[in-house]
Image: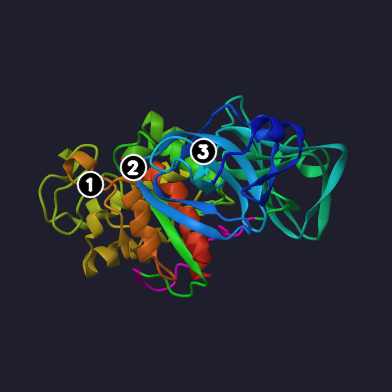
Amino acid sequence: MPRSRPMLARLLPMVALAGLLLTVLPSAAGAAALFPVRLEAGIQRGYTFDASGAIVASRTRVVPSPTSVSADERVWIPGRGTHLRIATGSLAGFWIKESMTAYKPGLVVTRTFATPERTAFPRGSYLGYRFDASWQIASTRHSTLTGDSAALVERRGVINGRPFAEVVSGTWVGHWIPIVSPTVLTAQKLTCASPAPVAVGSPQVFGVLPGAVNQVALTFDMGGRLTPARDIVNRLVLDRVCTTFFPTGAMSVTAEGQAVLKLIGAHRYLFEMGNHTEHHCDLVRGGGGSPSSAPCAGSGFSDAFIRNQMTAAEAKIRAATGMDPRPYWRPPYGSHDSRVRALVAGLGYTKTFMWDVDTIDWRPVVDGGPTAAQIADKVAVNAVNGTDVLMHMGGYNTYEALPSMVQRLRARGLEPTTISDILR
């Protein structure tokens, strides 16, 4: 596709590229200068278009881990949305659709209103954001509206590829609220939930979760490495992904573990807790353990030892989050039998959660583990209605896999949510 002339782009709000009428968006005015674009890990597709907007050619690349490239135009292509023309790398010369996986970092103001505009807030649950100078989350505000409402907004923009509007009245004054699209001023409600856990009831073991309605559970164990854990939680908050966590007691009392669980507890409208035992011992075969194997030495654990593994962890999870993990638990290494299940059920842990998609994210790439792109692809391709995905707060490439994973699941009509949301 021929390049647009920079002077024309500066003078006119619309330009014709190869006969195709394109809207030059604010960030592209005077677009001779290159600007950075972040491509998240996963599948990236670029296109060229003819004069009618039909696709002429496409190119697909798998980006193993997030990377930065340069672009020279950001335009609205009628019927196709905002696109970025990539100028460097293997997708140079192709247009990539702007999204949470391909974007100009930070804020791109797309419109400022001389008189604040009314934004609709249909009945539902909403989450607003304040950002710091680097456009990372500084704070959030959640509220549920029992009836349709509205608020005034002063600016519309895209923050790290996600459409927002800046609210200047009402409950979310001073916050950016997600909107349904870059051009539609309707607030985007939460599409997942974290209701109270199901009743204790009779013992059950779950793999694929019954009762799902176009839903999957992205679940995270927290029993070892915690380097990206807070980043993972913040990304889940930014993308409004309801999640179930299974921490161990031992990791819950570390300095980083405390910070992670405090962040989770501050967003309990998105998150819920399960129990992953105190020391991550293999309760059936013996051994195991994290971060130390010493408490798990030997085999043939006594009834009292197994009970203490659950009650000690529960006390620490409650103290750190204010949340009750019962009746949910996940056995370390997926190791359980009728004796162990009976013992933990006696403590109120009647719901044993396994998984049907295992990301193996605890293994680094140098040891044969998956890249971020492979993690995202495994989940996006293999998830079915009711899938329970196993990931880890210390997963080596889990944080980088999340944007592509979440975007592709939602594109398939599968909403990530909590275990309780599915079981209820």
**The residue tagged with tag 2: helix, strand or loop?**
loop
Mark 2 to mark 1 CA distance (whole Å): 9 Å
4 left or right of 121? Answer: left
Amino acid at the residue labelled 1? Gly
Mark sitting earlier along the chain (2/3): 3
The quadrant in which residue 14 appears is top right
Disc 2 target residue: 397
Q: Residue furthest right?
A: 115
Label 2 and label 3: CA atoms lie apart by 21 Å
Q: Which of 345 and 369 is in front in this view?
A: 369
Task: Tell me, for residue 254, which label it has, or none.
Answer: none
Q: Position of residue 164 (x, y in %)?
A: 68, 43
Amino acid bearing label 3: Leu
93 relative to 120 in the view: left or right: left
Closer to the camera in the image, 193 or 43? 43
Picture disc at residue 369: 1
- Residue at the location (67% across, 29% down)? 30
- As shown in the figure, which amino acid type bears the numbered disc 2? Asn
Residue 418 percent coordinates (x, y):
49, 59
